[in-house]
Every structure is written in structure tokens, then in C-alpha cells.
Image (cartoon, grey):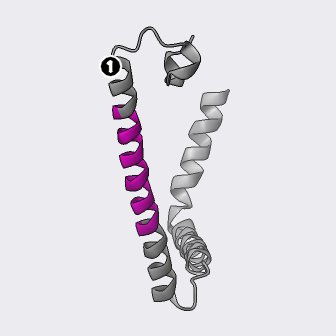
Amino acid sequence: MKRLFKKLARTVWLISAPASRPIIRKFDHHMMRLLGSLTLRAEVPANLDLALSSVDLALSSVVRELGRLQIQVEILQRQIDDLESSGREGALPESRLTVVSETG
């Protein structure tokens, strides 16, 4: 029964193709115009150059700060390595520097 209904629907669809194609084409064109206008309505800042320059300035300051922090971390790591290798095993644990990930 299902096969018979599908065959009948396909035949009706093929017979009505000359009349339905222009209607489908107009509907498709209308929907594309509507969807296209929705995507073009995205709000853009009035002064795009000013917005881009402020973003560029913010990103460059973040990069500088990241570099400064990396240098500080390397200095601290060297100091920790120097303290560990200096042979201060006899010192009290409270007076030595430890790395958080190394403590149990």
C-alpha cells in the first residue's frame, strides 16, 4: 500500500512539474532574499577603524603582559632549581622554597 501511494505521489509530482517549477523557483528566490537581508542587517560599529585599533591595542598589551609573566616564571624556576641544587638538604622544610605541584 505504501509503495502504491509513493508511486502515485511521484507520478502526480512529475505531471505537475511544469506548473510547480516556477512557483518553487519564486518561493526559493523570495526566501533567499529574506535570509540575505537578515544576514546583512548585522550591526556594524559606526567607526570600524576605531574599533579595530582599540582591539589591536588591547591584544598587544595582553601579549606584552604574557611575555613579562613568562620571564618572571623562568626567573623563579631558576631560583628554585638553584636552591634545590645548592645542597641545603639540612635546612628546615619551612625555610625552603617548594613548588606546589611537587608537594604531596
**Residue 90 at x, y percent in the picture:** 45, 8
Range shown magenta: 60-78
**For the point 49% across and 16% down, which residue is it?**
102
* Magenta run includes residue 62: yes
* Magenta run includes residue 42: no
The image quadrant that residue 59 belongs to is: bottom left
**For the point 59% across and 18% down, which residue is it?**
94
**Residue 50 at x, y percent in the picture:** 49, 87
Viewer-nearest residue: 86 or 75: 86
**Residue 45 at x, y percent in the picture:** 58, 85
**In which quadrant will I find the N terminus?**
top right
Amino acid at dot 1: Ser
Horizontally, residue 18 falls left or right of residue 43, namely left
Q: How many marks?
A: 1
Viewer-nearest residue: 83 or 38: 83
Mark 1 residue crowding within 10 angstroms, few (<14) / some (14–19) / many (20+): few
**For the point 54% across and 13% down, which residue is it?**
92
State the SS at label 1: loop
**In which quadrant will I find the C terminus?**
top right
The image quadrant that residue 4 belongs to is: top right
